[in-house]
Image: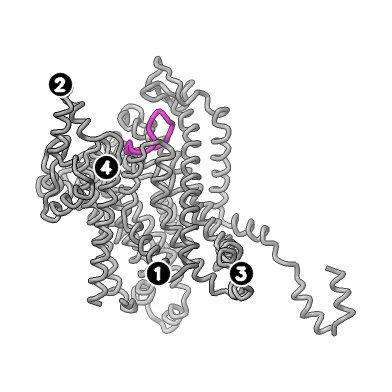
């Protein structure tokens, strides 16, 4: 067990290093470079090629790429993510507040989808063929097929523009203004959670239906157990495994969803930071944002994986 | 049928003929069975009809669309829906309805090419890894796991941004995040198919590895492969729309639904259809392909065979 955990942690770090290396190399292949953008921004002053070279030296972009990577990685381990080339702010500091925002929204969405998805799936499986099953199935299909940004825009249009009951955009941290924070979170959290809720509900439904057909369930009914006991003690225990396994995938869905949701709702999170940096070729910001996002996903997948063993003792760690 | 019966009567004892009769039952018509199971669920039929309509719309876009998707009517900027412009016009006076019709082509082109590229790469690697086993398989599968652990949107954003070439760039970016799924699927298939007697038979007759893989294993992987490809159509189209919405995919003026929705988002208060209609089109398209995929899975999955038909 201990050796399995250690192996998985080493493996997780290899993934993180590989991704950061790939991002580092890919970013340097981007057409156009940030130094040119700085020069272009300051068209009033007349800059010669010397200035360009000086800027390149300043940001360390004149050195060979492997040296740049090693240097960057060592600094990151010390918590220094460097400075934005375009706007000259300290990335680490800025990222801390953005990560808080993204985690607040993402974790809330994850918890909600982890509860609501299986719950809807169980209800619709037990009441199979009834109206509630039909409603859940339709909603699950909408949740899976509707593009995230479309659901977001639709909600903003309905609840923000038409009904005027929820703020259109923005985000406030709960400890700054709790009421506003809740009101601003409702739509983004719902949009992020919708896809995962839909997938979990579908997976749970088919898994529960499968278990309901097992012999031991018939035995449980036959020996006169109450419905509650059959459902909770026998059906749920045996049908939740595939649903829990799915949660690792849900985390990736949530990260992807929050990138789009942060753009739709203009939320100053990590995803918005990455997209903005991507649009302006701000190398250090792209590297920092992707590294942190990959880190969050890989580590939380690891935690989910290790939890399986706790939920299902049959799992043997080789 | 009667000829065989006569011949059997002459050759065998009546009791034996009865047994023979059972064996001589006409073979199940695979195609008929497929059609029957496929259309069993009404929702699949709806999806199938929608896919056909979508394909027709894409093929006949020039005939159906009343305007060119790029034609600017600058006297009619942000026109309200109704009249000559069914769904109104965008900020550049282009007819929204015509742009959505033409967007079908872009979405289908991206979906089909992404699915083909990722399936081709994934199947090839999956076949090789599955048949080679040993160290090669371990390395390939570990790398596949690693690729699947990366949030796909991050990878897509970076690659699409590096390639910056519109449709081909987006296709490649999305395909790179989808092919590991095929490797896993095919690798698993190969591992179980290899246990079959016919593979052992082919091997003992001295068939070359490549021949066994191509002639015996690949054809048996086709059913799950087709199901996976249909399911991935929707995923690919959604991914493209997301990238285009972020301004990192297919850029204007090309009529891609995702970038249309983003452009229209600015005018949400005044003309909500500009951003809501393209998104709805994406939903219909993804829904149709998912339903067809569901039907195909019911009809092609050997594990379900007979249970629904």
Which residue in the structure is indicated by mark 3? B207
Residue denoted by label 1: B135
- Proximity of marks 3 and 4: CB atoms separated by less than 8 Å: no
Q: Is residue B223 left or right of residue A123?
A: right
Element marked by disc 4? loop
Q: Quadrant of the C terminus of chain B?
A: bottom right
Q: Answer yes or no: is residue A185 visible.
A: no
Residue drawn at the location 16% of the way across and 25% of the way down: A48
Q: Which residues are magenta?
A: B245-258
| Circles 4 and 1 in contact, beta carbons < 8 Å | no
* Scheme of colours in the image: one colour
| Above or below: residue B152 compared with residue B170 | below
- Place of residue A177 in the rendered image (x, y in percent of width and height, measured from the top left): 11, 45
In the rendered structure, the answer to whether residue A36 lies left or right of residue B20 reads: left
The local crowd at label 4, few if under 14, some if 14 to 19, many if 20 or more residues have their Cα within 10 Å, is some
Reading the image, the residue beneath label 4 is A28
Is B299 placed above or below A215 here? above
Q: Nearer the viewer, residue B204 or A199?
A: B204
Q: CA distance from mark 3 to mark 1?
A: 23 Å
Q: Are marks 2 and 1 on the same chain?
A: no
């Amino acid at each position: 067990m201990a050796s399995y955990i250690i192996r998985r942690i080493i493996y997780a770090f290899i993934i993180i290093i590989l991704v950061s290396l790939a991002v580092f190399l890919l970013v340097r292949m981007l057409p156009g470079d940030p130094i040119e953008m700085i020069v272009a921004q300051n068209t009033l002053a007349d800059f010669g090629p010397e200035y360009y070279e000086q800027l390149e030296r300043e940001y360390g972009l004149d050195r060979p790429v492997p040296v740049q990577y090693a240097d960057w990685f060592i600094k990151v381990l010390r918590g220094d993510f460097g400075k934005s080339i375009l706007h000259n702010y300290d990335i680490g500091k800025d990222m801390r507040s953005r990560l808080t925002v993204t985690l607040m929204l993402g974790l809330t969405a994850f918890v909600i989808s982890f509860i609501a998805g299986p719950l809807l799936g169980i209800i619709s499986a037990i009441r199979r063929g009834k109206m509630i099953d039909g409603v859940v199935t339709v909603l699950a299909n909408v949740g899976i097929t509707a593009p995230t940004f479309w659901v977001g825009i639709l909600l903003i249009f309905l609840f923000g523009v038409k009904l005027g009951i929820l703020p259109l955009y923005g985000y406030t941290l709960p400890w700054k203004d709790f009421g506003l924070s809740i009101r601003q979170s409702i739509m983004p959290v719902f949009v992020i959670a919708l896809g995962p809720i839909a997938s979990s509900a579908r997976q749970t439904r088919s898994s529960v239906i499968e278990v309901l057909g097992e012999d031991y369930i018939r035995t449980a009914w036959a020996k006169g157990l109450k419905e509650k006991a059959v459902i909770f003690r026998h059906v749920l225990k045996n049908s939740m495994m595939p649903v829990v396994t799915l949660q690792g995938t849900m985390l990736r869905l949530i990260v992807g969803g929050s990138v789009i949701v942060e753009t739709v709702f203009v939320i100053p999170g990590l995803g918005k930071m990455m997209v903005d940096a991507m649009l302006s070729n701000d190398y250090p910001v792209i590297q920092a944002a992707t590294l942190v996002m990959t880190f969050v996903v890989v580590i939380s997948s690891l935690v989910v994986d290790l939890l399986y063993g706790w939920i299902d003792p049959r799992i043997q760690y080789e | 049928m009667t000829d065989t019966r006569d011949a059997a009567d002459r050759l065998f004892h009546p009791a034996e003929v009865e047994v023979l009769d059972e064996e001589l039952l006409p073979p199940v018509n695979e195609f008929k069975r497929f059609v029957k199971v496929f259309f069993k669920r009404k929702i699949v039929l709806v999806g199938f009809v929608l896919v056909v309509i979508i394909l027709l719309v894409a093929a006949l876009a020039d005939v159906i669309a009343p305007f060119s998707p790029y034609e600017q009517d600058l006297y009619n900027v942000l026109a309200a829906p109704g009249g000559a412009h069914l769904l109104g016009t965008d900020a550049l006076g282009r007819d929204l309805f015509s742009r959505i019709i033409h967007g079908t082509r872009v979405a289908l082109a991206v979906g089909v090419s992404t699915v083909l590229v990722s399936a081709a790469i994934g199947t090839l690697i999956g076949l090789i890894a599955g048949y080679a086993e040993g160290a090669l398989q371990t390395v390939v599968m570990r790398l596949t796991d690693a690729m699947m652990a990366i949030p796909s949107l991050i990878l897509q954003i970076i690659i699409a941004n590096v390639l910056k070439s519109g449709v081909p760039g987006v296709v490649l970016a999305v395909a790179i995040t989808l092919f590991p799924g095929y490797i896993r699927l095919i690798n698993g298939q190969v591992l179980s198919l290899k246990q079959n007697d016919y593979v052992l038979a082919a091997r003992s007759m001295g068939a070359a590895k490549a021949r066994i893989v191509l002639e015996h294993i690949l054809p048996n992987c086709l059913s799950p492969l087709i199901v996976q490809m249909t399911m991935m159509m929707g995923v690919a189209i959604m991914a493209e729309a997301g990238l285009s919405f972020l301004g990192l995919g297919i850029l204007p003026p090309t009529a891609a639904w995702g970038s249309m929705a983003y452009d229209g988002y600015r005018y949400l208060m005044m003309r909500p259809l500009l951003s809501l209609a393209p998104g709805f089109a994406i939903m219909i398209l993804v829904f149709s392909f998912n339903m067809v995929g569901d039907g195909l899975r019911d009809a092609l999955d050997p594990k379900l065979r007979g249970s629904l038909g």
